[in-house]
Image: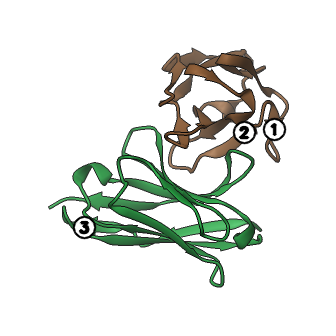
Chain colours: A brown, B green
Amino acid sequence: EIVLTQSPGTLSLSPGERATLSCRASQSVNSSYLAWYQQKPGQAPRLLIYAASSRATGIPDRFSDSGSGTDFTLTISRLEPEDFAVYYCQLYGSSPEWTFGQGTKVEIK
Amino acid sequence: EVQLVESGGGLVQPGGSLRLSCAASGFSFSKYWMHWVRQAPGKGLVWVSRIIGDGSSTRYADSVKGRFTISRDNAKNTLYLQMNSLRAEDTAMYYCARGGWLSMDVWGKGTTVTVSS
């Protein structure tokens, strides 16, 4: 079973700053199988990035991802007020077939 | 507009059953994998189950295997989750989501399931 560990648990930043969120897999994975989601309080998750750096429809280019093997990063180049939320990484694997990380909360400093 | 609307949640006693529905609109439902994902209060996302477009293949998280059954009616553009032998730890918001490329690209707003006596 592959486990995804996200860090930090909470990131306190100011608007305009750069956010770097980590997602580490317990074993090497195909980067094309990794996706990232954003969830705001009281809302459903929203797909941000999938299949190795493909942004979902309507996602601005300040969101990007990188990484390979076991270490992956979601970067928000300049935080906008609407970016303060919880972010999850997700992996398509074998057992379980779909796995989420525990999430990173990006809060206003 | 692509839309998913869940229904069927509610309060149920431990050991009871509930059937969730997810009505899809705005896309060719039968062409897509569909998922159920849940989120306990204050916790993270947990994948529950998925079904492929024609319904011939399903997968489950170990925590629900043998108790939950995912199904779909492509003529009605509706996804289902039959939940039996419910436990307190099944209490969560349940989301249906459309399968994108190895991801979940459209989500419903969710339906709340509370298992309590």
Secondary structure under tag 2 reads strand
Chain letter for mark 1: A
Query: Depth check: B35 or A107 in front?
Result: B35
Q: Which residue is mark 1?
A: A55
In percent of the image, x 85 and y 31: which residue is there? Answer: A61
Going by the numbered disc 1, the residue's amino acid type is Arg
Query: Depth check: A12 or B27 in front?
Result: B27
The answer to whether marks 3 and 1 mark residues whose Cβ atoms lie closer than 8 Å is: no
Q: Give the CA separation, mark 2 to mark 3.
A: 34 Å
Chain letter for mark 3: B
Q: Considering only vertical position in the picture, is A30 above or below B56?
A: above
In percent of the image, x 36 and y 53: which residue is there? Answer: B64
Residues at marks 2 and 3 on the same chain: no
Q: Which residue is mark 2?
A: A48
Instruction: Give the left or right position of residue B67, taking residue A48 as reference.
Output: left
User: Which comes sooner in the sequence, label 1 or label 2?
Assistant: 2
Give residue B3's quadrant in the image. bottom right
Going by the numbered disc 2, the residue's amino acid type is Leu
Rendering coords of residue B99 (x, y %) = 67, 55
* Numbered badge on residue B12: 3
Query: Depth check: A28 or A90 in front?
Result: A28
Which quarter of the rendering shows the N terminus of chain B? bottom right
Q: Of all residues shown, which one is farthest toward the left?
A: B117
